[in-house]
Image (tube, rainbow, N blue to C red):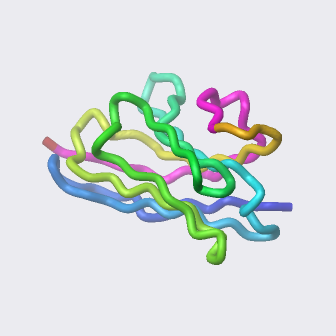
Amino acid sequence: QVQLVESGGGLVQAGGSLRLSCAASGRTVSVYNMAWFRQAPEKEREFVAGITYSGSSTSYADTVKGRFTISRDNAKNTVYLQMNSLKPEDTAVYYCAAQWGSTRVVTTSSGYNLWGQGTQVSVSS
């Protein structure tokens, strides 16, 4: 059974940076497409960024394009989300998710098979 554990969240001022990590245990994630989603209070969970199992393809939400970068290190069974130029509207709980069965990045939460517990990111103005 694969488990996903996020870390790296915290409080940062607007314009600052954070790097989130998603470590997998129990099985290699090298065969899974991986993604980050986020959910702000009273809002629906939304896609942030995704990467295919090989790392050859990535996808980003328009709201984070140019500021966030998703990457993966399959040897370390870890996926990262580098977040730069953070804005108060980036404040949310960030979730890591794993998906299998597709050759491309899936951007809908219903398409993901496994989720982490989430890590809080708060950006002050």
Residue in the foreground of this view, choosing between 121 and 106: 106
**Number of numbered callouts drawn:** 0
- Magenta residues span 105-124
Q: Position of residue 6 (x, y in %)?
A: 55, 60
Q: Most extreme residue toward the bottom, as rendered?
A: 75
Residue 28 quadrant: bottom right
Residue depicted at x 37% and y 57%: 82
| Above-or-below relation of 98 to 71 | above
Q: Most extreme residue toward the front, as rendered?
A: 56
Residue depicted at x 46% and y 43%: 93
Q: Position of residue 4 (x, y in %)?
A: 67, 59
Residue 40 quadrant: top left
Q: Most extreme residue toward the top, as rendered?
A: 43
Residue depicted at x 51% and y 29%: 46
Quarter of the image that includes the N terminus: bottom right
Quarter of the image that includes the C terminus: top left
| Above-or-below relation of 12 to 62 | below
Question: Is 79 left or right of 32, judged from the image as shown?
Answer: left
Q: Position of residue 105 (x, y in %)?
A: 63, 38
| Above-or-below relation of 61 to 26 | above
Residue in the foreground of this view, choosing between 114 and 67: 67
Residue in the foreground of this view, choosing between 125 and 52: 52
Residue depicted at x 58% and y 69%: 73
Question: Is 7 left or right of 108, judged from the image as shown?
Answer: left
Q: Is residue 119 magenta?
A: yes
Q: Position of residue 86 (x, y in %)?
A: 24, 46
Q: Is residue 125 magenta?
A: no
